[in-house]
Amino acid sequence: MSNDNTKSYLQTRVFDLMKITPEQNKVKVTVEDAEGTDRTVTMDIFSSDDKDNIDILVYTIDRKLIIYDHPDANPEHPNINNNRDRYFKIKRLKEPKGDMKYMMPKGVGTYPFFAPGLVEKYEKAEQIKTLVLTEGYFKAFTASIHGWDIVGLSSITHYADTKTKAIHPDIAKIILKCKVENVVMLYDGDCLNISTKALEAGEDLAKRPNSFLSSMLKVRELLTDYDVKIYFAHVLSENINNAPKGLDDVLIECAGKEKEILEDMLMLGTPGQYFYRLNVSSFQKKLQPYFNLKNADQFYSAWGDIIKDREFSYFGTRYKADTKTGKLIKTVPKEAKNFMRVGDDYYELVEVPTIYEDTETKLFKRAKSTIKDDFGVDIFKNIPKYKAFTNMPSHTNFQQVINNCYNKYAPFTHEVQEGDWSTTKYFLEHIFGEQYEFGLDYIQILYQYPTQVLPILCLVSKENKTGKTTFLDFLKIIFGENACKVGNAELSNEFNAYTATRLIVGVDETFLEKKTTIEKIKMLSTSNRVAMQRKGVDHEEMWHFAKYILVSNNEDNFIYASDEDVRYWVRKVPVIQKEVPDILSTLHTEVPAFLFFLNNRKISVKKTGRAWFEPKLLETEALRRLRIASKPTIEKEITEMLRGMFSAFAVPEIRMTTDDIKERINKKNIENSYINHIVTDNMSVKKSDKVVRYKIPAWVINPLDTEEYIKGDESKKPGRPFIFEVEKFLSPEEIKNLSIEKPDQQKDVDPGEKQGDLPF
């Protein structure tokens, strides 16, 4: 509430408008206590949250609270929220966000609402002759207190169990236990109407009424195996003062006539004053024409007064009424909108099903003769034509056509919505560990700045069940057709049309030996132009913004990386501690909420380089091991020898000539020129610029105890030694632990000077 003198939204919406008493707002539910025993508690059905929204408590027909994990619970990182369960509630927003009036927990499923009166009848196994299903918890509660046997649904499509896809089990329980004879699916009074917004936007006008028709047909299908008659019904708004749409609005508008309204509903075999009814068990075929969806002519006949002479879309085909004859003329057949000509070639957009019960739009090349055979020559005049392809990624301001060029980047289909993304958080914390915030930055940059260059992310681990490949699948869920997975062979292939316009190219089971392929990835990861090569087709230069993600079970040798390679971000991923069943489906469900989080998050690091991140921020032990493994054998031996000496003697620098090195790694037969090449070119170590006298740290015999070795120096004759500095071989932490301090700049001493003048 804004102040003490303002009524809460709960008070005005529930108690004042719906005329519900505080006593009617109570329900007895069962909850399991710490000992595992069910106990009965009394709770409010409608309550206020801290933002003055209304929370609606949802429970099963058996009075059990629906409990789910707190969104901030994290099995890998124990916190207080791990022991805090949440009760399932639907939130009615005081201030709707666009078209969104209600919010419900994500990834928990959908549940019907049962008012206390219906629960009591179920418990007593009282016969319910007619059970009504309707969209809306407020509607169901309001009708229930006036004697209706009614179930509230959270959506016209939320009548089934999210896992089994059968009618919701609690609804089935009521039908069976209470010997229900009739099931009525009751819709609002505007269920037949078209959307004027869709008309103005040029969208398909059949979509809205068809969603209600499809909902009714699906309910009929799911109830076919039950011994009930199934009815379609909707409010006859035009017969009632002020044309109320929903059942709760009807009861409020017609206060004092509640009994009459209920009786009108129950008279299923006769025409009603308040409700239209149709027995779809027997007369299913009447539904389609009743919704004015039999054909385009019937549809226009019903809605022509609104559409008038404007062009409109009906099930994908565009029509316009002839002003003289009144007959409909096809302006663009629905088949034509799926085709396009780019340059001299034809393509078709095809909706391809995915495992997530939705579709992806893919572009396939088609021969002109095939299109002609299927649809005739007239279709070609309606097929849109473009000059060329382009590739311009955007997830916030996408344009399909730019300067008459067709954008090959696929539209971003997700709707952003506040909600739970706890499984996504758990998964990303597992993948990125101590670099979790950088991981969020990486995905956020992909989403908000898709043209930005990013490091080559490498996820490695010898173990299975780490989530490496699942991460690629997760990005594919978010970015759809703009992400792809390839193997080593495809990466080496000269034909790159499959990957050229993608945002993400994931390479699974990476093991790249060819230097040309490695250099190709490094080049493509920073280049914004690429020559797209297709078999039998001339090369075509295209904008290119791909980010490469390498996944491998080979931790140390999946790719070559020198000390100068700063493009790689290598993370060793551990085995996941707690497996989440069907994790990809859950991640898919949480995408809208995850995007909402990213939209309200600030990137944790400022852009400091071409690939955004300062390379030192992404230095990991896994990258260090990869660099070491990439070195020639001699370089590895020299490095390990020096690491051992620095660790043993805790000195800031070590000086050795080429012969000294050969002696200590026991490689006396190797040419000096090769050792010099490795040390100078690969290790970037310089020689003293003049001949000096130097010493090498060594274990020497203790003059006081000939059986004991102590730290000392091995004297050497004059030479031009390489100067190896500890910072190149030990990490800052290792140097700190050894208490190595960098001395003042050591002066090289000419061997002609007196021994006493030497610095050691």
Image (cartoon, rainbow, N blue to C red):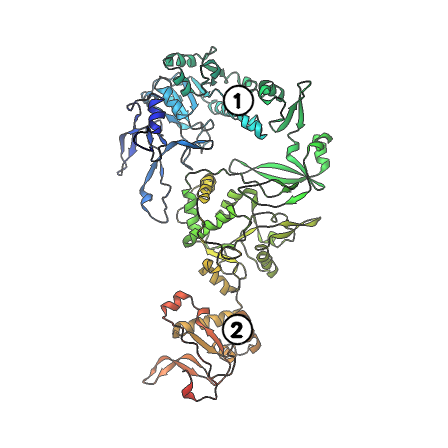
Amino acid carrying label 2: it is: Val
Circle on res. 257: none
Does residue 465 appear anywhere in the picture? Answer: no
Q: Is residue 618 visible?
A: yes
Residue occupying the point 35% across, 31% down: 55
Residue indicated by mark 2: 679
Residue 132 lies in what quarter of the image? top left
Judge whether 436 appears above or below 684 on screen: above
Q: Nearer the viewer, residue 555 or 545?
A: 545
- Looking at the figure, which quarter contains the N terminus? top left
Q: Is residue 624 placed above or below 723 in the rendered structure? A: above
Q: Position of residue 539 (x, y in %)?
A: 69, 50
Per the model, the C-alpha gap separating discs 1 and 2 is 79 Å
Whole-percent x, y for residue 562 in the image: 53, 64
Check disc 1 and give the amino acid type. Answer: Asn
Label 1 sits on a secondary structure element that is: loop
Q: Which mark is residue 193?
A: 1
